[in-house]
Image (cartoon, rainbow, N blue to C red):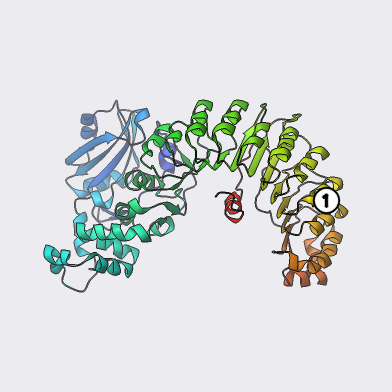
Amino acid sequence: MRIEHKIHIHQAKMSLTDVLEMPQPKFSLRDAEAYTEDDILIYTICLDNIPKELTETEIYEFFTSYGPIKELKLFPRKNGRRYGLRRGTLQFLRSFSACSVIRDKRIVHIKGHLITVEPDGTWNQPDHDKLVNTEQPIFQNDLQVLENTTTIHAINNDCLQIILKNLTLPEQIRFGRVCEWFADAFSSYAKSRYKTCDLNVLNSMTLWYARDFFRFAGASFERFNGSLYCERGLEYVDYIQEYCSRLKELNLVNFIVHDEFIETLLHLTQLEKLTLIDNLEITGKYISEFVNLRELSLCGCGLKVVHMKEIVRNLPNLTVLDMTRTTIVTTDLIDEMVKFCQKLTVFKFAIKNYSYYRVAHLPSIKYLEIVEDHSGSSELSRTLQELAIHRADEMEILAFFSRSKITENEVKSIAKLQKLKVLDFGYSAINDSMAAMLCDLKELEELSIRRGMDLTNQGLYPLVKYCLRLYHLNIEDCREVSMVFAIEIIPLLKSTKHLRNKPLLLYANGSRISSYYLNSVYQYRSAALNTLIEIIFDDPPPQYPEDVNDCYRKYRYNNFLSSYNIIN
């Protein structure tokens, strides 16, 4: 079950609501005893959010009321040292004592402090070895054969690799549990088979299996399929820190982390792509030490200029940088980027009351997304002029969101970007004369024009006629574009089909093109059947917010990067 709150890697003083919203570990109750999801009796529980003021003696005395205790261990949280918080494990002598703690409670109050309690993992329960011994053997031979060290080592690695290839993932994990020799064989097999870890597959297993998969194969992981933002996200992040030293991509969307957490990841020396979105406690500190980083997204983070300057100075391989929904992009920072970011091809940023035209001087820039969070500025106009001078033959993607109205001179500058493939005006409306200027963009493939109240059928038709590569046209809320345009362009598309690579996708929500009447028009039905055109009335991707202050969007730039070879 997907949890609906953001996962906090750090733990401050937690409220009762915070605790109750956390994902509940899976366990079952039978006959006054608790069992893990692997059906092992629970003796050991985890304690979390323990403040430094609370002593081990006070904790011990509190839990002895539930039953005799065999062992209590306290240790610092990996990501909580800035708050002085600790974690702990407590093992009871009797299983029903542990059950009485976790059965109805997720929190306990000790000396006025809120402590979270939950069952520990199967691997930390005293009876966990019984599960290993009772699981279905992988081979039909007597397991005593495997206990003979000579026989085990007589099986060469090639044979073990063939065996592993014919096992399912759970069987491979059980195979690795048999002995150290088999564990090493699984780790060797994972180097070629599990460079990508599918989190969706792991989520269908028990946490013990997932943990052992990280333990055996984590050193081979380079990236993940699926989101770490899931019910087990906290555990997976811990396993990444411990086992995944070769990771190249890490996406921590919806995780609230802080700078000290980033410091714990510095052993990921091969990291090439890091995504940290909406983390106000991320200032940019330590990120400059990921020297192999190529793609960095810091959208909505609480960045500091001093750390961003360190990043642009020390990451020579940086090709993608997203700083939208931040307020620290300054003229000085852009000057530093022009000097040091020689390979930067993609830059997405928000700016307020600073000059930014120098982004046009970034030596490798091909994709710019600009959110201008102020009105009455001439910076956009100057930036477009500079792009026309310095990047006319290199710019491929341009998207901007400004409070100011777009002018004809600005559109003239855009029309000089001859290699432009994707153009997004945000909500800056254009008219027919401006649309005519865009006909010079022969490489244009995607064009988004919204709220063009003065844009008519006559202004749009030449765009379709002369931009033969255009296949994505967004005219939502262009209320002067009608059914006449939709019908008139069909003969044009038919006559130029041999010159076009793809059918025209026309996003017409909010225009005067009627979805009700469209399907009754024979010409359109025939054209759609022949893959000439498809008129769509759903919200088109990408989707943008009304307010340019909220500029984080699910933009499809990953597809752009791969299809247009922006990143070499």
Instruction: Name the one closer to the observer, 11 or 451.
Output: 451
Quadrant location of the N terminus? bottom left
Say if residue 454 shows up in the picture: no
Q: Which residue is drawn at 73% across and 72% down?
A: 529
- Element carrying mark 1: loop
- What x and y, as percent, mark residue 235? 36, 46
- What x and y, as percent, mark residue 92? 19, 44
- What x and y, as percent, mark residue 54? 28, 28
Instruction: Name the one closer to the observer, 349 or 69.
Output: 349
Instruction: Name the one closer to the observer, 76 or 399.
Output: 399
Query: Does residue 12 appear left or right of residue 299 in this picture?
Result: left
Q: Mark 1 points at which residue?
A: 479
Say if residue 80 shows up in the picture: yes
Q: Residue at x 59, y 43 (%)?
A: 346
Amino acid on which the number 1 mark rests in the picture: Arg
- What x and y, as percent, mark residue 300? 56, 36
